[in-house]
């Protein structure tokens, strides 16, 4: 998908970023020099046309530095990076959000719309509300603007969109709203419209990060401060949205003659060793002998595809019946790779259920991220191709691991569409698991 080119607009006013984080034309010029040297010179995912557009915008940004606020600088760097149109090539949205103000609601995407799933204090009446507009800008237009700050599929871009929608400062820097400190939000809930002036809380570097991913969990597992409430009570949440901190989980589902396994990442982190978990799963599968398996990859943002490749290729030998893989736009990078390895190994027994994964079949990855020294902007880079449609046969620039162990699948779109909607979420239902139950009847 080709990204629309947006005109650069810079206002004279604006506010600075977090306490202790200031920028000047000189420091921004330093960051641009580093950006050219460490990002533009090595990034491989740009098409020729989009690279030319990115260079043009970067040159225009350099000219405009004397009247550019720090927030405008961050937004424009994100747009330049986003022109690569690659999910692994982005100026990271969460660190950007932490440097700018944020209103006391947390939204998440449901099929292209954005709903309030968490709210604080007097704004708790907005829980479950759909965003209609901000300062008169329709939500659909704001979504288009947010999509210019991120590359990749539409579903993947939606993941980062709430971090823009929740910040008057970033919205103003993007040219979407009237002022950096506050904005007038219009929501719709239960057939009624609510207009609310929301003021952004000052950025607090000590506050825990809270992305749209965590907003989906009724209990996000991180301290938020006083007064926060969730749309869905934690005790009413389906199993997949419980225990947000856990990285790997499993349970028996005797009503389905199945084991349900959840990978929320494709790497080890302190307290969660992915190799140990896979060894445990193999032992449990061999001991309990379930006929079917449900592999939930919906909240798996990726990691290292080599950590699960052998296990995914071996899984069909451990389960005699059906294998269902639950996917979503959060199924990204190595999670999509793992899904591809499993689909390729047993295409007649694997059924994908849910929503399309957050990566295309062809994408670029593998570069180490950089941090611009003066602003702290974190940028992910991509230097090696992945091609899961042809197994990299037409290319000489593919990642070595997928050359040696290729993936070649027709699609990773779900065989059975079962997206979470705001109605099923509010009711504490899991539409993908409901679809699996119907398929096994």
Image (tube, grey):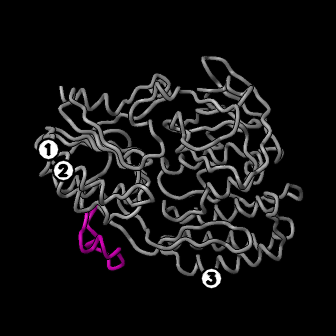
Q: Position of residue 396 (x, y in %)?
A: 32, 79
The residue sitting at 48% across, 24% down in the picture is 423
Could you say which disc has been placed on residue 283 in the image?
2
Is 253 on the left-hand or right-hand side of 9?
A: left
Write down the quadrant of residue 134 in the picture.
top right
Position of 408 with respect to 139 (left or right) is left
Mark 2–mark 3 Cα distance, whole angstroms, equals 50 Å
With 438 as the anchor, is 363 left or right in this view?
A: right
Q: Which range is magenta?
A: 389-407
Q: Are marks 1 and 3 in contact (CB under 8 Å)?
A: no
Residue 380 in percent (x, y) is at: 54, 67
Q: Which residue lies furthest to the right in this view?
A: 13
- Outermost residue on the front side: it is 271
Q: Give the residue at x 71% y 53%.
A: 206
Q: What element carries label 3?
A: helix
In the image: residue 303, left or right of residue 294: right
Q: Name the residue under label 1.
A: 287
How many neighbours does mark 2 have within 10 angstroms: few (below 14), some (14-19), or many (20 or more)? few
């Amino acid at each position: 998908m080709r990204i629309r080119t947006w005109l650069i607009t810079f206002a004279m006013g604006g506010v600075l970023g977090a306490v202790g984080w200031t920028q000047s034309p000189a420091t921004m010029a330093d960051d641009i020099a580093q950006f050219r040297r460490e990002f533009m010179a090595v990034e491989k995912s740009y098409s020729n046309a989009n690279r030319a557009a990115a260079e043009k915008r970067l040159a225009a940004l350099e000219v405009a530095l004397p009247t550019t606020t720090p927030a405008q600088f961050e937004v424009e760097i994100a747009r330049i990076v986003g022109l690569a149109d690659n999910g692994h090539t982005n100026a990271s949205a969460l660190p950007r959000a932490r440097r700018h103000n944020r209103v006391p609601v947390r939204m998440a995407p449901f099929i292209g719309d954005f709903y309030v799933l968490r709210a604080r204090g007097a704004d708790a009446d907005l829980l479950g509300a759909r965003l209609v507009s901000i300062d008169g800008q329709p939500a659909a237009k704001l979504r288009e603007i947010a999509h210019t700050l991120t590359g990749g599929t539409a579903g993947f871009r939606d993941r980062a969109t709430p971090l823009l929608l929740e910040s008057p400062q970033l919205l103003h820097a993007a040219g979407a709203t009237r002022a950096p400190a506050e904005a007038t939000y219009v929501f719709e809930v239960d057939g009624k419209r609510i207009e609310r002036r929301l003021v952004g809380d000052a950025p607090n570097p000590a506050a825990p990060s809270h992305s749209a991913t965590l907003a989906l969990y009724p209990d996000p597992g991180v301290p938020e401060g006083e007064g926060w409430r969730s749309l869905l009570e934690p005790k009413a949440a389906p199993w997949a949205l419980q225990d947000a901190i856990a990285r790997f989980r499993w349970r028996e589902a005797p009503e389905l003659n199945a084991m349900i396994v959840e990978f929320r990442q494709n790497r080890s982190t302190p307290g969660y060793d992915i190799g140990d978990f896979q060894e445990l799963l193999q032992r449990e599968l061999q001991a309990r002998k379930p006929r079917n398996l449900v592999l939930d990859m919906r909240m798996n943002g990726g990691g290292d595809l080599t950590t699960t490749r052998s296990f995914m290729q071996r899984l069909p030998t451990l389960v005699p019946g059906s294998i269902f893989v639950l996917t979503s736009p959060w199924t990204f990078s190595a999670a999509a790779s793992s899904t591809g390895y499993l689909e390729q190994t047993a295409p007649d027994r694997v059924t994908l259920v849910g929503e399309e994964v957050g990566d295309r079949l062809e994408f670029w990855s593998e570069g180490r991220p950089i941090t611009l020294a003066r602003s702290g902007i974190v940028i992910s880079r991509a230097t090696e191709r992945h091609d899961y449609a042809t197994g990299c046969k037409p290319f000489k620039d593919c990642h070595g691991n997928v050359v040696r162990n290729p993936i070649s699948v027709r699609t990773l779109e779900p065989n059975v569409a079962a997206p979470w909607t705001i109605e099923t979420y509010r009711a504490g239902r899991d539409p993908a698991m409901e679809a699996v139950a119907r398929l096994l009847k």
